[in-house]
Amino acid sequence: MLLPVAVHLLGRRRAPIVHFAALAFVMATNPKQARALRLSEWLLVAVRSLIAALVALALARPLVPVPGDWASGVDAGQQAATVVIVLDDSLSTFAKMGKESVFEHARYAALALIERLPPGSKVSAIASGYPARTLVRQVGLDRGAVLDAVRRLEHKARRDDAARALQLADAMLANTDLDDRRVVVLSDLQATGWQDIIPPWQGRKEVGRQPITLQVDRIRPDSEENTSIIDAVAAPAGDRSQGQLRVDVELMHHGVKPWHDYVTVRAGDREWKSLVQLAPGESTHRSFLLPQSAPMAEILLPSDSLLADNRRLLRLDSGAAVRVALIDGAPRPVPREDEVFFAARALELAAGHAGELAVDVLQLPGLTTASLQDYDVLVLANVGELPSDLLEGLSQAATAGKGILITVGDNLPSDPSTYLPGLLPVPILGDRNAVGQSQGHGGEALRLDPARQDTLVSPLVQRLRQSLDAVALDETLVNHYALVQPSPQVSAAQVLHLAGGAPALLVVGHGRGQVALWTTTLDRDWTDLPLQPGFMPLIHDLCVQLAGDRGLERKNAVAIGDTAILSRDDRADQLEVRIDAPGNAPKILLDASSQRGRGWQVSGLLEPGRYTATELRSGAALTARSVIAVPPSVESDLRGVHQGPLLKAWRDVDKRARRAPKVPAWTGVLVVLLLLLGVEGVLLARGSWRLHLRTRRTRAQ
């Protein structure tokens, strides 16, 4: 670069000294032209210096970092190895990292690592979002296929399936012929998905083979501060004549700094706002009154680290609630002594929180089968003997798919073998007083049958056992109950039993529906259960589960990755599910012959939003309904794991090796060099033309 400058300074032409008259000197001098000439000469010197520098730079074949890209600090190694890359594509990796997301940086790191692997290496890739899946079938030498699969991977709002992803990686490495086997995890290590995950190969010894090496690169977002919508439900506002619904929104703040801002609810062309202040780890509820005429509502939060959980859709149609009829068989003038008083209060409270139940109390006199058609669950509370036409109607309702809960009491006939024939799930032998003792009081405690894999146990009984596992029932005492005839069917249908072994809650299938038997009362006459904290979740879960497909379908939303269960019209042979989005949105088409049971099981809802499920018969639409898919709330807490083998493997990664990936830049340097050579030519031509004009002008003078 200094050579053109030196040539310019040393090779300058020295003007000869010519003596002439002062007047001629003044007339011949043009100061403006002299300044322009000096500027052109120095510009030419600068261009020549840059040309010299660019020639050297081009010969060095420079590399420049790619803005926004991320290269893993994981060492690619020097020898051929079998490498399985586990790429985290769960919801939490939507979090911001610079101008892009954590997932995009993880993708760049995966691509850069695959390209850096030594010759002869075998590679494959796995996505850890639910359900964990392999991006290529097996490890192999075809890096191009793996690179294409990683580039095509679509990022969806899934929950983590980390344990399954590591199991798939372990299976892929089982049959490789290379000694060096590695699993590389590229993830944010979000705690709810990765905490306490133990690699399946840890502690395993394989004769004649080196153990599998785990390498983890934790790619963290810019901030872990995040506020999310945990739940949103709609319920009647109390006075239905006003035509309003109450929308309850549950929010939670994850992070270490306090948060305050507005939550917004939109319905139609109107919107409502509420100011929320939350401490770290705190949750809160906000209620809004909305017109019942709007079919949908949209809940919004302001922008933060994770945008994907700041928006949620909510159905406002009143048909979303499961309708429960409490048929009072022993009404009393004192409310607290009435048979269904505690059950009605518990279900109303549960409905007010969850928005899933609409409860009515009915009296036996004047009750007809037609008056029960609109209900999904019927609770026969100590009803005694029923008219034959009503009993037949109840049996038909259960066969058609409704849920029925039967509870006993003082109205149990002296000969219980004739009680509710054709409807009672198991025969009743009689009633008896409890003989057990607990905490100094007469009575037997309730016990939950454990959830276990048993082909004789129905899926509903399994779900009830799982849902009631966290319900506090240990302090409940039963001092009077009905005895049922023991049989293998009773053992398979038993959900709760007494400490002495007698069944307390049985559920048996009846056609398309379910019939449950509660062997004691719903009031305080035979048990203190209505006074226990476990009574409300018990009666709520029981009613929702008895509603079957109706109850599952009418839930407010289904989380991404979960299976939506819809009731099925017997006439339908197909179900078409399509997201309500502009353009050619992909659709899911299910055949009735491929479905188990009497409902539709819809999986593959991978985008948050509203879906329309249409039942078809020979291509013609029968019914249509809405299904709302929401992001999994467990992914909203962006805090990472705090212990375990994954964290240790991440700390062992050489952070100094992490650098932005680079691309060749010498071609660009050559282009600039050619442009500068063109500029030099223009400057030389311009100077020659000026000199020519000046010479002609001088001669003319």
Image (cartoon, rainbow, N blue to C red):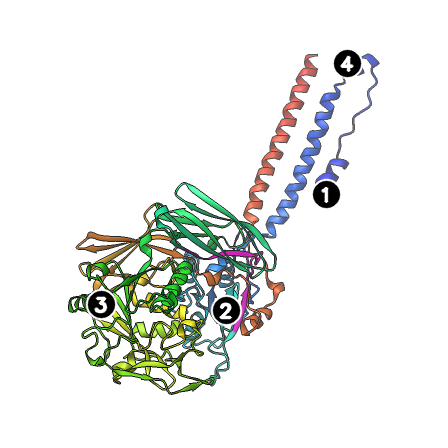
- Residue type at mark 1 is Leu
Q: Quadrant of the N terminus?
A: top right
Image position, residue 547 (x, y; %) = 29, 65
Tell me the CA gap for discs 4 and 1: 38 Å
User: Which residue carries the number 1 mark?
Assistant: 2
Tell me the CA gap for discs 2 and 1: 59 Å
Query: What crowding class fits label 1: few (fewer than 14 Cα within 10 Å), some (14-19), or many (20 or more)?
Result: some
User: Which residue carries the number 2 mark?
Assistant: 194
* Sooner in the amino-acid sequence: mark 3 or mark 1: 1
Q: Mark 4 and mark 2 in contact (Cβ < 8 Å)?
A: no
Q: At 26% across and 77% down in the image, what residue appears?
A: 412
Q: At 19% across and 69% down in the image, what residue appears?
A: 395
Q: Quadrant of the C terminus?
A: top right
Tell me the CA gap for discs 4 and 3: 118 Å
Tell me the CA gap for discs 3 and 1: 97 Å
State the residue in front, 689 or 37.
37
